[in-house]
Structure formats: C-alpha cells, structure tokens
C-alpha cells in the first residue's frame, strides 16, 4: 500500500514537472533569449519582424492553448510576450526594448524554437577623407544597447591631429562644433577634463607650448609627426639664480595658487595672475626680475610671473628687482626628444600593450568617473600607429545606456587599440565630422567644453 502511494506521488510529481516545463516557453540568459513552442501534427510557424518598435511575430495555423494572453519579463531586452487567437490561427508577439538581430530558428517534429541574441555589434565604416575612416556601431551587450562612433586616423597621411582651447584661450568654453569650425577641421572630439571656467584640469601642451601641468601623474597622449605615445606623465620645475644655484621648485603652471605653492603664470593664463594679496610675486621679463608685488600682478608679454604663498613666499622673498633667474619646466618622460608637440592629459588608463588595465585609483580619480555606466570619450593607439577617437552615447534608456570603464577598455581592444585612455565624458562627449555632430549628447544638446582634439588636413592628402 505504501509502495503504491509512493509510486502515485512520483507519477504526479513527474506530470507536474512536465506541465511546468511545457509552460516555461521563454528562458532568459545573459546573452540570449530562447523561446520554445510545442508543435502539434500539421502545425506550421512563420516568423516576421518589425523594427520600430522592435517586435518578433510568430504566426501559426493552430492554437497554442498553454500560453497566457500577456506575460511581462524583468529583462533588459524583452519586455512582454502577447498571445492571441483568430479565425486563421494564433499569433505570438515578442515586444523588445531595443533593436535586436534576427533569431536562429530550430524546428523539429515536436517543437519550434527561436534563439534570440541579446549581444551583437553591427558596424558600418566609410572614408571621410584620405587617412580618416568613420565607423558607426549599433551594439548591445547583456547590460543593454549602445551607439558607438569612432574615427580611425592614419598618422602616415599628411594629417595633423592637434589640440585646441575653447575660444583660443585658457579660460572659456565653446562647443566642439564651434572649435572644429574655427579650425576648419575634418573631425573633432571633446578633449581633457576642465573646470567650470574652462581651464584644463591636467596636462595640456599645444604646438610645443606647455599650457598646464599634469595632475597626479595621470595618463597622457603625446602626438608628433607620424607618432603617438601614451604614458603616465610627471612634472618638475625649478627656479635657478644667475650663479646656477637653485632657489626653489615649482608646484604648478597657469592655475590658481594654493597654500605653500609656487605657481608660474604665462600670458596663456591671461593678462593678470588674479591672485590675492596673501602671496608674493616676482614679475620677470627677459630673465630679469622687474617688479616685486603682493598679488594680481600684470603678466608681461614675453615674460612671466612667479607667485608664491607660505613657505614658498619666504624663498621667493630672497629676490630683488634686478636679479636674474631662469625657470625650467620638464615632463617625465621627456617626449620632446621624440618630436612630440601636442600632449593631452586624460585618464584613467584603459589598455596597456593590448590588455585591459584600469588605473583609476592610482591616478586619484573619484567615483563619478570610475563607477557606473556613462557616456564616454576615449582615445587609443593601434599597433600600426593609427589613432582611434571613440565616443559612446549614454543615459538614453533603450537607445544607448553608456559604458563602464572596463567595458570601454574592452571596446577599444575590439577596435584594435594596444594603448588607450579615457577622456572627459558625460555630457561633454561629442564627435563632429565636418559640420555635423555625429553622436547624441546626453544633455539633449551640445555642451560647451574647455578644449578639443581636432583632425586637420595638411597640404597634401596623400601618404608621405
């Protein structure tokens, strides 16, 4: 009796399992969705698609009575499955949040199955100019869809990749399209991080002139003739007297002076230092101290101002009008030996020697850069010395959700980068080709930025 009851329980459990399995028509995986429909004798299935909005429609000549009229899913891609019956048969409609590729169909005597990929990358490429290729990707991963735009620039062509300040000055902001228009650029992207005033936050050198010093030895890109290099870059500066003795060291260049700092101000900063009266400043022209002042000194054309506070004020106080001195600033590594004339600081590093390497903590980045998914701009170098300028749209649900730094690094590797670093992103992310903004900025419109990377044609469009 007990054995018969146990056997009955086993049979009931098996029937329940079969019923549950047959009802489980949709199986969700991180990278795909599998729809399985039972198939009766003489049953025929046809599949069709609509793209806007994205739907997969499965029509059958027979009913599918085990399906509910509607079923919602907690999935990044699939939103709902709807079922209906009519005089000619039945219909299943899968509603998706974004575009997906065609499914793989498997059909045997007892079931019909769709294997629907959620991860894909559809890429188109076209030539913008000799040596400049524009690529566009619509892609999706397990976390959602993204729109990627990238430029592939062959440095062996007679092209110049240059850096440009907004409004051609240290303080100011301008849309990337405006900078590109002024420079008559083939293409441009936003560049380095910047303060609310537009001042670059980190290393910037334009046409061989150092504009601002690196911060926290962050990763930077250096550009020269047919050359691109990438490394973390440090800064050192010294003030030496006419007899060769060292007076003191520099802490910065063309930025606000902080406690116990000595800052060098050039005309790139403006006409005055805009400092307070708690410091001491030496105005230098042709290597000679011409004035000693308390603050907000006028920066002479062709000269500079040394502005000191605290401990550094005491050292600078040893100077007198008429003293001669020399200021040297240097970067480490010394890329000027390679002919590098354009340097832009960014970070963190994304790719080193073809492998993912995120250096956010070492480079003292905060979580607003390091953590989460966002619109991104990045720059990479390929093995054959091509330059990659990449933007990823973001903060646009079901269109382009943005990327984490790790995902961005993997994208750069996929595009061929062996070295890559992050640039300013978020609402600043912008790519311009000719007069057109190619990406969709997350602010809904183009944001004014402090600087940009521009691609300018040379005298010839042929490789040299």
Image (tube, grey):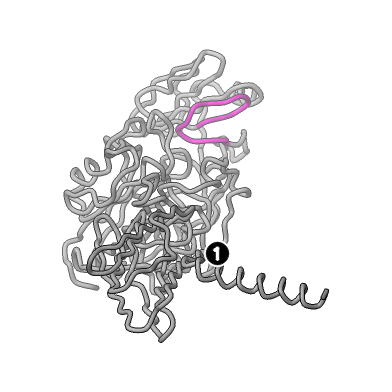
What residue is drawn where x is 55% and y is 46%? 371
Q: Position of residue 205 (x, y in %)?
A: 40, 47
Q: Is residue 63 in view from this perspective?
A: yes
The image quadrant that residue 56 belongs to is bottom left
Can residue 338 be seen by looking at this rendering?
no
- On the image, numbered disc 1 is attached to which residue? 356
Q: Is residue 201 above or below residue 70?
A: above
Foreground pick, 140 / 410: 140
Which SS class for mark 1?
Answer: strand
Residue 264 coordinates in the image, percent (x, y): 49, 32
Query: Looking at the figure, which quarter contains the N terminus?
Result: bottom right
In depth, the one of 240 and 397 nearer the eye is 397
- Residue 5 image position (x, y, % from top left): 77, 73
Majority secondary structure of magenta residues:
loop
Q: Residue at x 47, y 65 (%)?
A: 26
Residue 41 in the magenta stretch? The answer is no
Q: Residue at x 38, y 56 (%)?
A: 69
Extreme residue in the right direction: 2
Say if 116 sits above or below 451 in the image: below
251 falls in the magenta region: yes
Q: Position of residue 353 (x, y in %)?
A: 53, 69
> Which quadrant, please, contains the C terminus?
bottom left
Residues rendered magenta in the picture: 250-263
């Amino acid at each position: 009796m007990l054995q018969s009851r146990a056997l009955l329980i086993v049979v009931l459990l098996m029937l329940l399992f079969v019923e549950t399995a047959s009802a489980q028509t949709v199986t969700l995986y991180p990278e795909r969705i599998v729809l399985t429909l039972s198939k009766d004798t003489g049953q025929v299935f046809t599949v069709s698609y609509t793209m806007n909005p994205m739907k997969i429609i499965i029509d059958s000549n027979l009913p599918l009575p085990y399906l509910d009229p509607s079923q919602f899913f907690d999935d990044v891609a699939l939103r709902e499955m709807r079922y209906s019956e009519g005089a000619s048969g039945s219909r299943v409609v899968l509603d998706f949040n974004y575009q997906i590729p065609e499914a793989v169909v498997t059909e045997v005597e007892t079931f019909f199955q769709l294997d629907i990929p959620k991860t894909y990358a559809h890429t188109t490429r076209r030539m913008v100019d000799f040596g400049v290729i524009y690529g566009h990707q619509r892609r999706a991963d397990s976390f959602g869809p993204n729109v990627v735009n990238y430029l592939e620039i062959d440095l062996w062509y007679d092209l110049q990749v240059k850096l440009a300040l907004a409004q051609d000055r240290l303080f100011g902001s301008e849309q990337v399209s405006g900078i590109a228009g002024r420079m008559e650029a083939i293409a441009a992207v936003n560049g380095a991080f910047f303060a609310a005033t537009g001042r670059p936050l980190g290393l910037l050198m334009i046409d061989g002139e150092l504009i601002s010093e690196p911060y926290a030895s962050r990763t930077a890109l250096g550009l020269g003739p047919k050359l691109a290099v990438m490394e973390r870059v440090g800064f050192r500066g010294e003030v030496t007297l006419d007899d060769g003795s060292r007076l003191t060291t520099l802490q910065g260049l063309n930025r606000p002076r902080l406690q116990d700092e000595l800052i060098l101000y050039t005309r790139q900063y403006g006409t005055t230092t805009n400092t307070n009266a708690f410091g001491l400043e030496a105005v230098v022209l042709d290597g000679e101290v011409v004035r000693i002042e308390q603050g907000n000194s006028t920066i002479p054309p062709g000269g500079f101002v040394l502005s000191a506070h605290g401990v550094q004020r005491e050292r600078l106080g040893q100077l007198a009008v008429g003293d001669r001195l020399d200021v040297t600033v240097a970067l480490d590594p010394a890329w000027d030996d390679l002919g590098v004339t354009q340097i832009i600081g960014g970070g963190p590093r994304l790719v080193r020697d073809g492998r993912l390497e995120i250096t956010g903590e070492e480079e003292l980045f905060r979580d607003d850069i390091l953590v989460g998914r966002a619109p991104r701009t990045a720059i990479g170098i390929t093995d054959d010395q091509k330059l990659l300028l990449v933007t990823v749209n973001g903060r646009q649900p079901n269109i382009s959700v943005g990327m984490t730094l790790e995902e961005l690094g993997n994208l750069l590797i996929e595009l061929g980068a062996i070295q890559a670093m992050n640039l300013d992103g978020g609402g600043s992310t912008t790519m311009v080709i000719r007069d057109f903004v190619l990406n969709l900025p997350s602010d809904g419109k183009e944001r004014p930025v402090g600087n940009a990377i521009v691609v300018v044609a040379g005298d010839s469009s042929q490789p040299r």
